[in-house]
Amino acid sequence: MSARGRQHSDKHTLPANPTYRTIACSDGSEQLWPRNTTEIVDQDGHVNFMQPIELDIPIAIRWRVALGAAVANAMNWPVGPSYVLQDWPAGYRMYDHHKGIQGAPRHDIYLFGGPHRFRSIAEFVPHIIWLANNMSTNCGCKYCTKKPQREITTDISNAGIFTPIHRGAGPHRSRQLQKQSALRKVGFHASVQKASKLKQSRHITKIAMVVERDQDLRAVYSRDAHKMRLKRWYREGEAVWVALNHPISLSGDTVKITLWPAIIEDVQLQKTVIELQNGTTSVSLPPVEMGEPSEQSESAVHPVRVPPWEVTETYAYKVKLLAVSRVYTVADSQVLPYRAYIPPSNIFSFIQSLPPDAFNLDKEFLQSCNPQSFPPPPWPSVVSAYAYALQIGASLAMCWNMTDEWQFKFTPQEPVKQPQQSQSSLTDAIAAASSQNAALHQAGSSISTAPLPSSSFYSGFDSSGCRDGLSTQEMQAVTEGMLGPSPVIGQTIEQLNFQGMWWGAERIWADEIVRLKPLRAVLAPEGTQHILPPAGPGKAQTELCHKLGRSPKEYGAGARGLFMRLERLFLVEGLSGGQKTKECRASGVLYELADKDWEDPDKAPATSESISSGPMAPVSTQKPLSNLQPGPVSPYLLPEAPEGYYFRPILKDGFEMTISLTMISGRYYPGILSHHLLKDIVREAIAKESEANMNGEKKDDTTGRNKHLWSLEGLNAGYVNSVDPTKYKIDRMQMIRDADQGTRDILTGYLERAKRRPVDELMDTDGA
C-alpha cells in the first residue's frame, strides 16, 4: 500500500569498504523464474512483463545491503564491517514487474527462485537467515509459518535483526510536521472560481497517475462496474464491517454480535460457473452475411447452441479482524462500509454493565480469540476482543493523511498581445492555472519580497459568500486566504498536490465523488452569480405533498445532500498573524440529487436522461445543461444516483468550488441501501416513515435513528454521517499501530478507573 507501485529510488549506493558475504546454502531454482520477460504492448497500450534486475542496480544494492546487515545481526558476525551480499543465493534473481500503461506502469519488485516469490526485504529476511543456518531449523518467513507479515516484522525488529524504513505514501516528515494540526486550527472555508481547462504547456509539470488510484476508481466508476451486482467498493487498508458466519450471543436472543470490524488486506476477483437448469439449449439467430440484408436473409434463421453454463464475477476480500490474529477471505456480500453500521445500543449497554474482571486485555488471549468458529464461542471469550476491536475502529476514524504527493510547478509568462475582441489574456491563463490547481503560491521568502500581484488574477473568484462592505484589500485577503498568494510573472511557483488521502476509515482518491457535510439548502438557497438554486420537487413528490397537506417547498434537492467530484487535493500556504500557515484544500465540481421528474424552469434543452441514475458517459462527453459548461475532463463515469434521482451539476459557466477538507463527510456508496445486510434495518425504517406519512405525522425515532444510512447515498446531509479526523499520521501502518496502542491505553485506564469506583463510592458513603 505504501511504497509499492512507484518508481524506485536510484540513490542507493554501496557503503564504503563493504565486506561481501555469500550464502552458500540455497533452495532456489532457475525453473521458478518468470518467463514473461519481453515487453509487449497490448491493444489498450498496457504492458505486463518481468524485467530482470542486475546486482548493481540501486534497488538491488538496497536489498543486498539490508539483507547483509540482517544476516550479520542474526548470525552474530563481528561488529564493525558493512556486510553486503556478494550475490543472491544460488537460483535466485530479482525482477521488476511492469504492469499498466506503457508510459507509466506500476513497478513491483520481486525476488524469484524459491518456492515463493518475495515482495520485500522484510519478507525475505527470515528466509535468508534460514538459508544462512544451512536450513537446519524451521524457516520463519510468512509463507512457511503462515503468520501475518506485520507480526513477523515486529518480531525481527524487536530482536534487533532488521528494522524496516517505513516509506509511507504521505508527505515527507519535515512537511507532515507542518501539516499535522491543520484540521484542528481551521473552520469551514469555501470559494468558487473558474475551472477553465489549461492547454498543454512546457511551463507546467506532468505527473503519472498512481496505478492503485486508477484501479480503485475504475472498480466503481466504469461501465463494467455498473454491470456488477456489488461493486468493488472497498480498498486495501480500509476499515470495514465483516458479517460473522454465526452470530455470537451476549445475552439471550436479543443481544448478538453479528458484524466485526476488520481491515481489507487484499482484493480478489472470483469467477463462478453456474450450470443452467435446462442444460444445453439452442436459440435461433439470423445468419451473418456481408452487404445489404435481403428479404430472404432477414427471414432465414439457424439454430446456435448455447453453453449449458453461465459465468458470474464477484469480488472476495482478504480481511484481518481487528484485535484478533485472524485472517479470512470473505465474499463481497458479507462486507459493509465502516460508516454503514452502528452496533445496537444494547451491545454497548451489555459491555458497560460488565465488571472490570470480565475483561482480559492480554495480547495472547486477544489473538487466540476466533469469532468465526463453530459453534460460536461463549461471550466471555470474545467480549474483550470485541470491545478492543470497536475502540481500534473508532481510533482509526480519527486519523488522516495525504498520500502520493507531487510537486506542481508553473512559470507565468509575459502577456501576448491579442486582438481587442479576444477575451483571452495572461491573467485569464493564470486564473485558469489557479482554478485547475486551486492555490498557486510562492515558495520560501519570495512571498514577502515579490511585487504585488495583478488584481485580475482572482477575477473569477465568487465573493457572493462574503459579507457586504468588504474593501478591496479585505477581499484580497479573503481570496488569498482561500486560494493562496497569486503568482508573479516570470517567477516559477510551486504547489504541493496529492493524488489521494486516508480519511478516517476510508481511502479517497482525486477524481471520485465524495459527500459534503452541508445540506444542499444551506448552499445558496436562492442561487448566486455562479451557483444555481436547488432543484425543486418533482411532479410525483409535489402531488404527494398536496395530498398530505404539506408544503412542496420543504422538499426537493435542498432537503438532500451535496456532492463534489474531487478534481484537486493540494496545500495552500498563506499568512496568519504574520506567520506562515499551511492548510489542505480540495476543489471540484458540485452536484445535487434532483428528482428525475423535476422540470427545470429554465427549460434546458438537455433532459434528465443526460445525467441519470444509470451508467453515464465521462463528464467530457455529456451534453451540458442550458448555460452550464462541462466540468474538468475526467476519464471516469459519474456513479449511479439513487433510484428516482439524477446528479445535477449546480455551478455555472465551468466554475469549480474550493473547500477545506473539513467539509468532506466521506465516500459515496451507490446502492448501499439495497445491501442484504441492511435490508431489515432499511425495511423497518421505510415502513415507519410510510406510516408516519400516511398519518400526516413527523418521522419517528426509528427513521431518525437511521439517518446515517440515508446519508451514505446522499438522501440526507453529509454531517449526519461524517468523518471528522484530527490526528495526522505519516502513513496507514502508523495509523493502525497507534490505534492499537491507543486502544490499549484507553481501555486499561477505563478498567482501572472502574475498579477504583466501588472503593470511592464506599468512602463517600462512610463519610456521609
Image (cartoon, rainbow, N blue to C red):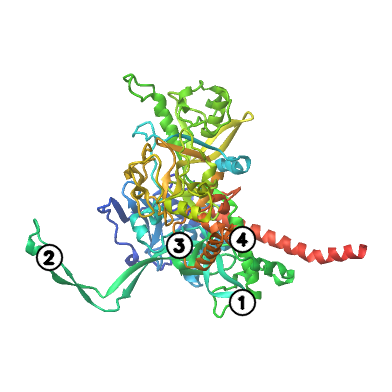
**Callout 1: helix, strand or loop?**
loop
Given the image, on which type of amino acid does mark 4 rest? Asp
Given the image, on which type of amino acid does mark 1 rest? Asp
Given the image, on which type of amino acid does mark 2 rest? Pro
Question: Earlier along the polypeptide chain: callout 2 or callout 3?
Answer: 3
**From where the camera sits, is residue 139 visible?**
no
**Callout 3: helix, strand or loop?**
strand
Question: Earlier along the polypeptide chain: callout 4 or callout 3?
Answer: 3
Q: Which one is nearer the viewer's eye here, 507 or 29?
A: 507
Q: Mark 3–mark 1 contact, CB under 8 Å?
A: no
| Residue assigned mark 4 | 701
Q: Which one is closest to the eye, mark 4 or mark 3?
A: 4
Label number found at residue 253:
1
Q: Which one is closest to the eye, mark 2 or mark 3?
A: 2
Residue name at image x 49 percent, y 23 percent:
453
Q: Whole-percent x and y of residue 483?
A: 51, 33
Query: CA separation, marks 2 and 4?
Result: 62 Å
Q: Whole-percent x and y of residue 74?
A: 55, 62
Name the quadrant of the C terminus: bottom right
Question: Earlier along the polypeptide chain: callout 2 or callout 4?
Answer: 2
Query: CA separation, marks 4 and 3?
Result: 39 Å
Query: CA separation, marks 2 and 3?
Result: 46 Å
